[in-house]
């Protein structure tokens, strides 16, 4: 949830400009495809100081498109549309909108050449229906598409901007970042840099965070706007200066002050994930990581393998449900699993150490627990939502018991984030020569 | 993409009813949260014969809510809203909409009692701001919330229906299925059963599928409506009878005819995933499965561990990048990896067999390849997008080479689906006593 302070969208001179996003397609309304365009474009605009005012998703039907576009064009200053630019007969957005704007569509020879080259590169012949995609607005421009056939379209009319983007995300996203954002910035319709300084924190709740940072914020009074966004064990904080009284450098200084106050709870400035931060620390220290997981079923391995160049630091992962797999792959002693149960501090520690030794890793994370899959789960005095994580490091191995209420997907994500954050903190301490002391008990709660 | 035939929403008597969904929240417009409510509610309505006509996402600001609600209320017959019913000061949807509808809000004692019981059950004390959630419309009803504090609200006025749902998905989803759908069905605003018979297919393209099934469809002429939806190696087909000329039993007979024609390409009727179907076959045959993956980084293990009761059939998974992990965990011979490369048919086969033997599984899937993470990928004559999958079964082991163009996430999902579908087919054959013959070469392309 977003809270506290005014929105970063309040910056002049485009504060009064209204942005709307029209996403087209029955597949969105039938729930067959998630509306990833809203997530992507909303976040990109937000970073540049614009709060998207409305997103409307409508059917592919011509009347619906015309009615909605007419209404949105009357209300908005910038309209972005997605989808409906392809070669087939249900791609009619271009034609419908041209009619509403009173524009003709004209054939664009440069687009035809680019499409022919693309088909030739793939050794395919272009069918005639593709030529439909080479039409642009007579008083408008083409946004070339390096990743597909349908180019984007750009129109300025009635003091407003219309930007039409192709539906496939791998075509839309680079086009938006490389072509649309610079054009909007050039026309003063958004900032040409990020509107705020974001820093991320982990392991501290939203209200505790606010309380700890309030003295810093208070010193800047109304010149500073602060927004928090909490998600699954992590809280992002965005500081901005809607009035422009604080320069970007001053905002960075505010973030640096917060970093000082927060210590290890401060993850870093920017948008890096916990897995990315761990990866950077592992690479800098030339250490390798292994993971073993039961309740999170592959999510922890996924978090690391998503990071570019994971092979450099990721020694491997094991996903297991059964005791057999733990014993066979990781040399976890059977007597230990039987005595303490698979969901226990002792088993988590044995799994982490087993993973590190078997895979030749310096660090290892183990996650075991009851995420709440079936009624049979949650036993031995541990209710559903009970998770044990263990961290094996070169100088010791520890475990933690966590308990998360909530539905299964939430429990899994929180468990993964808790494991990642623990590793991050331990790697930070190792970097500063302050590694946690090894203890005889090996259990930290 | 949805194609062919008229939409299943054309059924009488609610064909002319207009459904709109209002999703509220700055976090959606800032791209901080994906709009899962659209995906869920759109799919649920679609199954009952209703095509949602519009989804509008707006900010939490009172004026924006009032303006949009007024417009939607004039246009729609059924409006569903999500979010803004909570206890904090930015939860103002209830108040704003009451004003537009000219209704008073009245305190609902039964809701207060339910909230108090909920807080007591968690051993917490209810703060006074929670009482805000106990207000309902004077001429309206409460939809009790078994999973959270804010109940849903139901209003019938001006011949229209307004249904307001709480934002958290684990509260909204059961409320929608258990309370909202039956209420709408009772009022004749959607079907009281699924509007179509869906069957899923795998391993056949959309146009080839249409060509093969056309003779079946043609026999029923205009009484039958057909829609296809393709996603990553799988095509769903929905047959319905908007005019009502074909009964549900007749539609099922059409699906059975298609099943006959399609053979193994027919996955089954309903909404089950490939992993679910594999799980059912494995359980029925009392067999265990192991997986090992490089390029898909945990996604394959995830597909299986997501299935309820995965421990019954899932022996374990290994996620590895390095040759060391393959050698150490799965006894893949180093000479083989060095001679043929980690991305090769031979290595895939050795990985699958190693996983099956190490984890004591009957079946094993291996996926290795270049999904396209970094520039360094794609080597040894194999471009990015090259994937080898191997399947180990009790009676033999085989590999397949696949090549998927497209961005990294797409390559990963397609590789996972190809592996799942191969396993499904082999398990089907085993069930029918038609297991693939073991071959000396062990390589199938």
Image: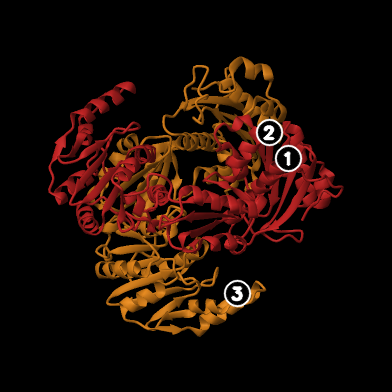
Chain colours: A red, B orange
Chain of the residue displaying label 1: A
- The image quadrant of residue B345 is top right
State if disc 1 and disc 2 touch (CB < 8 Å).
yes
Q: Nearer the viewer, mark 2 or mark 3?
A: 2
Identify whether B368 is placed above or below A431. above
- Tag 1 residue: A430
- Tag 2 residue: A285
Give coordinates of residue A383: x percent, y percent. 70, 61
Give coordinates of residue B270: x percent, y percent. 44, 51
For the residue labelled by badge 2, is the local secondary structure a helix, a strand or a loop? loop
Give the CA distance from mark 2 to mark 3: 49 Å
Chain of the residue displaying label 3: B
Number of marks present in the image shown: 3
Pointers 2 and 1 within a single chain: yes
Give the CA distance from mark 2 to mark 1: 9 Å
- The image quadrant of residue B12 is bottom left
Q: Indicate left or right for B248 with A325 as reference.
A: left
- Tag 3 residue: B118
Q: Indicate left or right for A197 with B52 as reference.
A: right
Pointers 2 and 3 within a single chain: no
Q: Residue at x 60, y 39 (%)?
A: A304
Identify whether B277 is placed above or below B194. above
For the residue labelled by badge 3, is the local secondary structure a helix, a strand or a loop? helix
Give the CA distance from mark 1 to mark 3: 45 Å
> Can I make out residue B362 in this image?
no
Q: Which mark is residue A214?
A: none
Q: Nearer the viewer, residue A273 or B43?
A: A273
State if disc 3 and disc 1 touch (CB < 8 Å).
no
């Amino acid at each position: 949830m977003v809270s506290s302070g005014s929105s970063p969208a309040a910056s002049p001179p485009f504060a009064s400009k209204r942005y709307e996003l029209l996403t087209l397609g029955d597949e969105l309304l039938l729930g067959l495809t998630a509306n990833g365009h809203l997530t992507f474009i909303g976040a990109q605009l937000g970073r540049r100081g614009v709060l998207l005012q409305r997103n409307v998703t409508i059917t592919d039907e011509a009347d619906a498109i015309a009615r909605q576009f007419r209404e949105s064009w009357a209300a908005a200053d910038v309209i972005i549309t997605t989808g409906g630019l392809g070669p087939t007969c249900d791609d009619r957005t271009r034609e419908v909108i041209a009619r509403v704007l009173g524009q003709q569509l004209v054939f664009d020879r440069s687009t035809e050449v680019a499409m022919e080259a693309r088909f030739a590169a793939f050794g395919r012949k272009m069918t005639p229906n593709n030529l439909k995609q080479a039409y642009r607005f007579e008083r408008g421009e083409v946004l070339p598409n390096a990743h597909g056939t349908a180019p984007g379209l750009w129109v300025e009319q009635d003091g407003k901007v219309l930007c039409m983007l192709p539906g496939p995300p791998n075509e839309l996203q680079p086009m938006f970042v490389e072509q649309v954002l610079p054009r909007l910035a050039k026309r003063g319709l958004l900032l040409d840099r990020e509107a705020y300084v974001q820093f991320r924190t982990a392991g501290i709740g939203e209200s505790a965070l606010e309380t700890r940072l309030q003295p810093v914020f208070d010193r800047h009074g109304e010149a500073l706007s602060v927004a928090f966004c909490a998600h699954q064990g992590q809280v992002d904080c965005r500081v901005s200066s809607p009035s422009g009284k604080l320069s970007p450098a001053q905002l960075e200084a505010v973030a640096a002050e917060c970093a000082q106050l927060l210590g290890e709870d401060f993850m870093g400035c920017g948008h890096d994930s916990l897995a990315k931060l761990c990866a950077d620390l592992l690479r800098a220290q030339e250490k390798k990581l292994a993971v073993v997981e039961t309740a999170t079923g592959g999510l922890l391995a996924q978090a690391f393998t998503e990071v570019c160049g994971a092979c450099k630091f990721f020694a491997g992962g094991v996903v297991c449900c059964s005791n057999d797999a733990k014993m066979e792959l990781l040399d976890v002693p059977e007597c230990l699993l039987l005595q303490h149960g698979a969901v226990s501090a002792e088993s988590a520690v044995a799994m982490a150490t087993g993973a590190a030794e078997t895979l030749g890793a310096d660090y290892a994370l183990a996650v075991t627990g009851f995420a709440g899959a079936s009624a049979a789960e949650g036993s031995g005095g541990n209710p559903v939502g009970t998770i044990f994580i263990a961290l094996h490091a070169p100088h010791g191995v520890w475990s933690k018991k966590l308990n998360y209420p909530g539905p299964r997907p939430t429990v899994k994500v929180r468990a993964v984030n808790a494991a990642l954050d623990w590793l991050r903190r331990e790697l930070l301490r190792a970097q500063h020569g302050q590694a946690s002391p090894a203890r005889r008990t090996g259990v930290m709660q």
